[in-house]
């Protein structure tokens, strides 16, 4: 009730507008669930018997902003600013939606009662409503009982619910990760039997659910549910494929379990909230191992170049899930670099090698630090401590060189304009080759005086073929 009282100035005000116009308005779904869990934010979901165009008329002039991008699906969005903060509001007409077997788009039909609307909701804990402004509690599917038991059930049969919208199977995993709830046995059985049905859902919607799962408090719980039910075979097949492989350091532990542990350890190192780039990289860092596994003559198992193969696989999977190019580049770069530290050995890296490590990581350096530290899952405390000390040493080397050389902005002593002026060149490939040569010298030997750079440029140019 305290949560509802906090939002009541806004909720009751908009409810009275609907009531005066002869319509019913109820707070619904996740908003009611989160209010009962004591975690309601400023995003409020409502449902009503008013049709979309009527909703538009009722919120215009009251809300500070209105948008109708979801109006084809019966939803109108609005923002209401108050002294206590801004509220983001979605109001949806009572509806039911179902997928045609051959279609990726839901077919929307409007309903006339709150009960009809609630039976089409994904889970009983999201199928509760509070009538406004009177605050009558509507719970025809005993969602409150399931909320107390922390169980995910469906209002209709799981088969009907998941057939209506197959993405609800992924939402079950997401809510398990977000709320630490357990799906009921019949829900798990239906997810397992109907897993392939997820393929009719657009990649964009799948990606959105996967992101919410990964950014949740207990992502490993949700990921295990995706793998155990077979859903991951269709949305992230590289993950279940890891169950069959042996970790090169611990043959008793498969790479699937290792990857989930790395994810948990990476999360523990986050300092500024959930980091999707780091979490994706931690989850996917070893997906190249199945394709690179080799059984050596001495009985060892090797995975040579799995980081390179894994980076390519990461790019392919993320492109199929419609991630942005920026995110793809960041995650795949971390996957590609995650083994670089192990070349550091006992701490004998040269200054040149440290410079290249920092330059290759670029803006991903802090994330690479966290990923590399998380990748140590050995139970041997002495070995783990030695690896931690070695990485501490590397970070100290980086800090020292950064203070001396401004490693974050490594560039040659001469820029492209100076190269063209000194060599009498016009813009073209030769200028790029010269710049790359000077950059290699900078990485190898550190900062160069201007005169030394000019001399090195002329020496390099004199050795180039001129035809």
Image (cartoon, grey):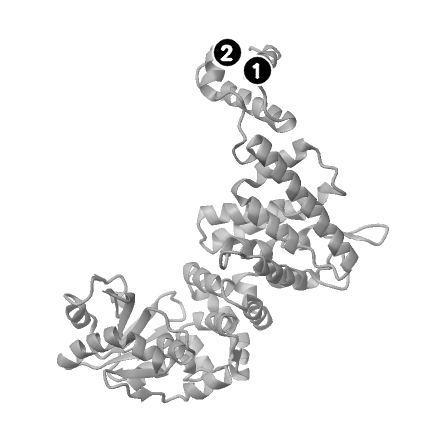
The answer to whether 372 is drawn above or below residue 32 in the figure is: above
Residue 416: x %, y % from top left: 47, 21
Can see residue 303?
A: no
Q: Quadrant of the N terminus?
A: bottom left
Task: Mark 2: give few (<14), some (14-19) or many (20+) Cα within 10 Å.
Answer: some
Q: Quadrant of residue 115?
A: bottom left
Q: Please state which of residues 233 and 224 is positioned toward the viewer in this rendering.
A: 224
User: In the image, which disc is placed on residue 35?
Assistant: none
Q: Earlier in the sequence, mark 1 or mark 2?
A: 2
> Residue at the spot x=41%, y=74% of the render?
39
User: In the image, which disc is placed on residue 423?
Assistant: 2
Would residue 277 appear left or right of 208 to someone viewing this image?
Answer: right
Residue 362: x %, y % from top left: 54, 40
Residue linked to disc 1: 457
Task: Mark 1: give few (<14), some (14-19) or many (20+) Cα within 10 Å.
Answer: some
The answer to whether 430 is drawn above or below residue 296 in the figure is: above
> Residue at the spot x=49%, y=59% of the render?
273
Q: Quadrant of residue 376?
A: bottom right
Q: Element type at marker 1?
A: helix
Can see residue 411?
A: yes
Q: Quadrant of residue 352?
A: top right
Q: Please state which of residues 119 and 277 is positioned toward the viewer in this rendering.
A: 277
Q: Residue furthest right?
A: 298
Q: Please state which of residues 344 and 151 is positioned toward the viewer in this rendering.
A: 344
Q: Assess whether mark 2 and mark 1 are in contact (beta carbons under 8 angstroms).
A: yes
């Amino acid at each position: 009730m305290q949560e509802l009282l906090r939002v009541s100035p806004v909720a009751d005000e908009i409810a009275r507008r609907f009531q005066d116009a002869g319509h019913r308005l109820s707070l619904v779904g996740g908003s009611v669930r989160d209010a009962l869990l004591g975690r309601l934010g400023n995003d409020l979901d409502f449902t009503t018997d008013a049709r979309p165009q009527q909703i538009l008329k009722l919120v215009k002039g009251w809300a500070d902003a209105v948008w109708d991008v979801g109006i084809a699906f019966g939803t109108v969005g609005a923002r209401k600013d108050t002294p206590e903060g801004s509220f983001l509001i979605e109001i949806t007409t009572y509806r039911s939606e179902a997928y045609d077997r051959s279609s990726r788009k839901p077919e929307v039909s409007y309903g006339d009662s709150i009960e009809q609307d609630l039976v089409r909701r994904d889970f009983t804990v999201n199928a509760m409503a509070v009538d406004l402004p009177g605050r009558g509690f509507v719970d025809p599917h005993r969602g409150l009982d399931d909320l107390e038991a922390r169980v995910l059930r469906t209002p209709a049969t799981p088969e009907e619910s998941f057939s209506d919208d197959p993405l609800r199977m992924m939402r079950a995993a997401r809510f398990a990760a977000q709320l630490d709830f357990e799906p009921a046995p019949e829900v798990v059985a239906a997810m397992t039997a109907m897993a392939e049905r997820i393929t009719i859902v657009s990649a964009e919607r799948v990606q959105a659910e996967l992101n919410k799962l990964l950014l949740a408090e207990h992502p490993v719980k949700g990921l295990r549910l995706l793998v155990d039910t077979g859903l991951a075979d269709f949305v992230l097949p590289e993950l279940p494929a890891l169950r069959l492989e042996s970790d090169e350091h611990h043959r008793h532990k498969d790479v699937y379990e290792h990857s989930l542990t790395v994810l948990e350890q990476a999360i523990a190192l986050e300092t500024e909230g959930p980091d999707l780039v780091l979490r994706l990289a931690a989850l996917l860092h070893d997906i190249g191992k199945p394709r690179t596994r080799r059984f050596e003559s001495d009985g060892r198992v090797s995975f040579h170049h799995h980081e390179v193969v894994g980076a390519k696989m990461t790019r392919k999977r993320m492109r199929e899930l419609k991630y942005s190019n920026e995110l793809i580049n960041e995650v795949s770069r971390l996957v590609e670099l995650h083994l670089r530290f192990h070349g550091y050995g006992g701490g004998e890296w040269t200054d040149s090698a440290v410079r290249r490590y920092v330059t290759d990581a670029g803006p991903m350096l802090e994330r690479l630090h966290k990923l590399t530290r998380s990748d140590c899952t050995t139970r041997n405390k002495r070995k783990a401590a030695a690896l931690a000390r070695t990485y501490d040493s590397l970070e100290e080397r980086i800090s020292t060189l950064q203070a001396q050389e401004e490693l974050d902005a490594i560039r040659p002593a001469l820029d492209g304009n100076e190269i063209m002026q000194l060599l009498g060149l016009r813009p073209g490939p030769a200028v790029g080759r010269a710049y790359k040569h000077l950059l290699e010298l900078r990485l190898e030997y550190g900062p160069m005086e201007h005169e030394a750079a000019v001399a090195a440029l002329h020496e390099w140019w004199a050795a180039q073929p001129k035809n």
